[in-house]
Image: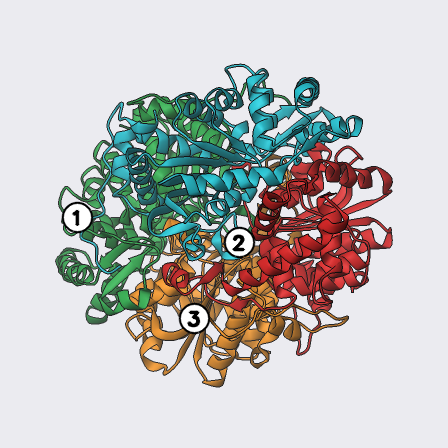
Chain colours: A red, B cyan, C green, D orange
């Protein structure tokens, strides 16, 4: 507050400029560019302080190119836990074998429907991808069921990941013992398969309550905690509420495309989270308003500790 | 497409003008006013056609004055099922006995935190409300556990509702046999109590998978279906995915504050849902961009079939 | 700040409920509903205190049903001055004789272009409307030029208004001596006619600088000042900068659909304006986030002093 | 429309990755990342085709680090004309000698006001900057007045630019004969000085109408035309309306933070512009939703023809 001594600096571009060099200039440039610069500093410090890092994202992000970054973060053990929504499992399982397609926001949706193409913004998912998913998931569930009748979501996703290939973030999370939490596991095509499987095997159960106990444990056991939260919804809220009782986050970066002015959690700011103790008072935290499909790559490419 | 024959009409106000009269003028006025007008027509027709109506909302809405409308819709049996996020249970249980307070978006959040006040946009929730909730929920769970060790979420919320007073929408849903679905039941303070209770009673289980089968059944059993979806997140997605296999909605109104251009489900349009078959091709559907805290009362006050 | 003593109240609807009654409930409901309630109180008090009221709006609003409210406010002398962008003159002149049409946001724009239909959101303007405008404006300019070779924008619009019919807000502003300011007069189809006219009559001049002196005078001469600002752009900024030197507004309501987080003036808040002195420290001011096509009718219908 | 053959590709980051390499990956990634990639291709092709390029921006951008890019584009003659709002002149003149400061969106605005600090989003402008501006502008106007009593805005800004130093985009535009158009010249602190100067020298006149004729001439004279439009308001609209009669743009990139759903020009899409003929049917055009403070540097750093 009050007059800062740091000037707003003009940006100077040059051929071949690196992302890191550009983002270090953006930090002094104003508006959301400044917030992006702050975010880089926050997650770099978190990594230096060995903070346990929760990565939270919505399923549309797993449908986009961001999935490649999620894979590498898991492969290189740069994150401690993942919190996401159920759709992410659909996207990861399918895309580990079959691509999604580049489309357009301005499509004729009824025509797409006729052609069997499902639209997610400007990403197209042909219907045969879901047929693949159904076969794959039902066979995995049958296999898992042979040894375990009741699992938490994170246990289930570790089992699923171990049955996928290296082109999957669930695979790398499983292999590197990074738990993947999903408080709303039924809400997607994967969940539909759970329902169908249970209709035939009534003793097959998913215990979401035990998983909540487990994620809360991290909050108590880990000394320093960092949250990188892309988008909103249940993945965002679950990450922060799970860390409430243990004292809240020490470091937090939100990337939001929602507005805070309608009271939604999706649009809620890191500042609001401090009133709840979900993020610690006095901690380093910033909200960047914009599209994670662009901002998250800039963030990670500029924080070399994550590469 | 092409030239419509309907003119944009100028609005004329008068002292004491009714909401219904104003909204019928807004319908011919342009921009989101036009969408609001379309939405009124859609839900009126749905009601006349006896469509089974899903009401979906995010928890912040249960923290606002909208809760009064939810109560009356349940009391008067104007809706067939509810889909919401877990926080709604916190808000309804607390507010059935203790008020939330009017606050400000521009608060000093660290100071609020010191004073024990949790901020949700411009609504303040004093910390003692959660103490009340913990006592209430843990005692209800203990009681329910005496007769049932394992429940779906909708079964649990019917039990909970029957233990609340008339100033609760869970009460009216329970009394009027309106199922309340919540695919992410653990994600809130109510969920925290579930976790604590289970830590002491390991055979206490919530079966979310069975509830997904149950909600999908409506999709097949009901002839005509209508969705009124306020806000985004898991409640929105769950409502539409649950109706996918049964052929999609015949009528749908979304009230969104998110943008469609970042690929989030929260910002997704009724048009996008048609590519998936979540909303039927050729059905009547509209997305209104704005704050449900204002738009939903206008919608319901103008569609007298819901009063 | 801190704990307010006012509870969030549940909304209760009833058949035939008036806008005023509903909005008085919204005031205690939370999120933007609360801001709308505050706005009603602010402009009612401004009117009781005989504050001089600037009404500012963008041209798309004059293309919508809001134009009817602008007409009545001018006819009933409820506003002191208007600040708008040039497109508003196109919309008012055309619509005083020929309607715009209800369209759709999801149109095929290239096809519309082929059909000679111009799209403004979900409002369609057939191309012949601009032919009418060209004929009308060029003939008015020729007439005005006979007596005045050089005018300020507000003088020009008073002349224009006097040549229109009662179905025009420019007519009522002119008849009731309400000045209409437009700092960017050339930026529209009306402006194109100015350019063409000047190409033939090189001594025809518009003096925008003198108009700026004139609007600033109000800031010094009027005791209490109120701003009702719909949308952003130059109309918004001009209203507040014109009142800076005279000490800023005593009352202000903004209705914004833009976000404040990108540093644009369109998204700037009433709070930010206080740092500049464009709105007085300690004054009553509120920003409502949403679509003016819905919110402005609610505001005026609830503030009976404006009817 | 229909199924595209291009897959959504996963992003792979590496240490030291260049902006160009990252953005070429973003192009295949989805959501706004895809739009950014398209925008790079569009302006590269425009440059190869020697299209005459209009750069349009709002004044807040000139207050941010983007001003450095504007300077270099003008210095290196990469743009043909500039269209902006009046505030840009304030920002450029001040910042050519005195810095703005990095601030915060969450400031106490009344306290800032007491300290004489003006807030523009998270950029602070200490009050003494405006004292500097007043002295500078009034002395420049006095000098210009000695030789010219009446100027168009673009003539005036060429004169002003020639009196500034190399740390100014107005300087480089003036030196390289790049016209700077501003249809709303009075709307800012620079405009206030125009008003004060004219109060003492009543024969001093700004002719905005003649400037509109001049900018429209480009539309007819240039063979291929490209628009790069940052933000909305009058600068955006003026750029496209000025090119309407000459057949519309061949290439266009918008970077918007506003939504199209409220009918504002600020939120209007490149698609909508095609219905008007402001952008040619069949031309290459894209709208990127997000913050130009981040997106514009990515765009220009990736389109090496502009460096």
Disc 3 is attached to a residue of which chain?
Answer: D
Out of A65 and D288, give the one closest to the viewer: A65
Task: Identify which residue is drawn at 63% across, 56% down.
Answer: A137
Q: CA distance from mark 2 to mark 3?
A: 40 Å
Tag 2–tag 1 contact (CB < 8 Å): no
Task: Identify which residue is drawn at 26% across, 66% down.
Answer: C195
Task: Identify which residue is drawn at 59% across, 22% down.
Answer: B160
Disc 2 is placed on an element classified as helix
The residue pinned by badge 3 equals D285
The residue pinned by badge 1 equals C96
Q: Comparing marks 2 and 3, which lies closer to the viewer?
A: 3
Out of A75 and D239, give the one closest to the viewer: A75
> Farthest bottom residue?
D49
Disc 2 is attached to a residue of which chain?
Answer: D
The residue pinned by badge 2 equals D134
Q: CA distance from mark 2 to mark 1?
A: 43 Å
Residue C53: quarter of image: top left
Residue C5 percent coordinates (x, y): 58, 17
Disc 1 is placed on an element classified as loop
Out of B90 and D197, give the one closest to the viewer: B90
Q: Comparing marks 2 and 1, which lies closer to the viewer?
A: 1
Disc 3 is placed on an element classified as strand
Which badge, 2 or 3, is on the more N-terminal residue? Answer: 2
Residue B13 percent coordinates (x, y): 25, 31
Residue D98 appears in the rendering: no
Residue A188 percent coordinates (x, y): 57, 50
């Amino acid at each position: 507050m009050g007059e800062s001594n740091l000037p707003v600096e003009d940006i100077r571009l040059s051929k071949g400029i690196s992302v890191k060099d550009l983002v270090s200039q953006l930090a002094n440039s104003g508006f959301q560019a400044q917030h992006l610069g702050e975010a880089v500093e926050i997650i770099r410090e978190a990594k230096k302080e060995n903070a346990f890092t929760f990565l939270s994202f919505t399923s549309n992000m797993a449908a986009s190119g961001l999935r490649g970054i999620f894979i590498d973060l898991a492969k290189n053990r740069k994150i401690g836990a993942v919190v996401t929504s159920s759709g992410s499992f659909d996207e990861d399982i399918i895309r580990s074998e079959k691509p999604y397609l580049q489309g357009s926001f301005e499509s004729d949706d009824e025509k797409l429907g006729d052609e069997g193409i499902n639209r997610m913004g400007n990403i197209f998912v042909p219907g045969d991808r879901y047929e693949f998913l159904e076969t794959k998931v039902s066979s995995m569930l049958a296999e898992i069921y042979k040894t375990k009748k009741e699992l938490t979501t994170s246990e289930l996703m570790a089992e699923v990941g171990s049955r996928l290939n290296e082109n999957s973030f669930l695979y790398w999370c499983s292999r590197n013992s990074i738990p993947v939490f999903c408080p709303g596991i039924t809400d997607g095509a994967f969940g539909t398969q759970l329902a169908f499987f249970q209709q035939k095997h009534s003793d097959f159960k998913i215990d979401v309550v035990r998983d909540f106990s487990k994620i809360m444990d991290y909050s108590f056991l880990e000394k320093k905690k960092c949250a990188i939260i892309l988008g909103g919804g249940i993945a965002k809220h679950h990450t922060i509420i799970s860390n409430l009782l243990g004292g809240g986050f020490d470091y937090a970066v939100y990337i939001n495309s929602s507005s805070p002015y309608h009271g939604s959690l999706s649009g809620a700011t890191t500042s609001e989270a401090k009133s709840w103790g979900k993020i610690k008072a006095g901690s380093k935290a910033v909200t960047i308003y914009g599209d994670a499909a662009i901002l998250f790559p800039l963030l990670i490419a500029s924080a070399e500790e994550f590469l």
